[in-house]
Image (spheres, rainbow, N blue to C red):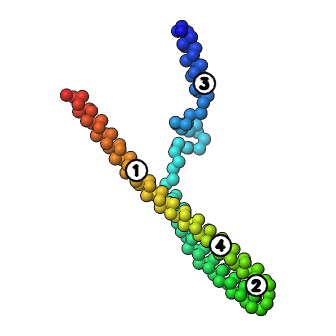
Amino acid sequence: MAWEEWEQLKARAADRHSARLQLNHHAVDQGGGGTRGDLVAEHKDLEAVGKAAHDLFNDFTTYSGHARMASEAASGGLKGDGFALGDALEHVTQRWSEQTRTLLDACAHISNHLRYTRNQHAADESYIAGAVSSVAALDEGFDDRKGH
């Protein structure tokens, strides 16, 4: 293979490589929106989401309970007076209860997931700090040996 042929092959390979998608880095912000390259969720942001989910859970539990009890009472009264509407209202009340449980489960899931994420992040930080300090100690050992 001649030197010129080698240079041509390298140039073609570089051209093909430049057109590919690269996932090992983030492009530098080009003045658009101040991106930082990493997904960032600050503690205060997660805390606000968790508080909103907790507040919704508590408030909705209270208010949906009032609506359920009033609907059950109305349903029982209508059925007791012989109105077919009582059965329909009872069905609506049952569906309301099912949907309420679904929403409350979702709120609890959000809260639990945020708690898990916070704990996992702390564990990851601890692991990374230990690994980095181990590498630093290893590097220091090699540096010490160079001096001898």
Residue 41 pos. (x, y %): 51, 53
Residue 118 pos. (x, y %): 45, 57
Q: Residue at x 72, y 81 (%)?
A: 90
Residue located beneath label 1 in the image:
125
Tell me whether the residue at label 2 lies in contact with that at label 1, contact meaning CB atoms closer than 8 angstroms: no
Q: Quadrant of the N terminus?
A: top right
Which mark's residue is nearer the viewer, 3 or 2?
2
Q: The residue under label 3 is which amino acid type? A: Arg
Residue located beneath label 2 in the image:
86
Q: CA distance from mark 4 to mark 3?
A: 57 Å
Indicate left or right for 11 with 90 as reference.
left
Mark closest to the chain's N terminus, 3 or 2: 3
Residue 40 in view, yes or no? yes
Q: The residue under label 1 is which amino acid type? A: Glu
Which image quadrant is residue 28 in?
Answer: top right
Q: Quadrant of the C terminus?
A: top left
Residue located beneath label 4 in the image:
98
Q: Residue at x 58, y 39 (%)?
A: 31
Q: CA distance from mark 2 to mark 1?
A: 58 Å
Q: CA distance from mark 1 to mark 4?
A: 40 Å
Residue 48 in view, yes or no? no
Q: The residue under label 2 is which amino acid type? A: Gly
Give the answer, above or below, for where 120 lies relative to 102.
above
Numbered-mark total: 4
Indicate left or right for 52 with 82 as reference.
left
Mark closest to the chain's N terminus, 3 or 1: 3
Residue located beneath label 3 in the image:
16
Element type where label 4 sits in the image:
helix
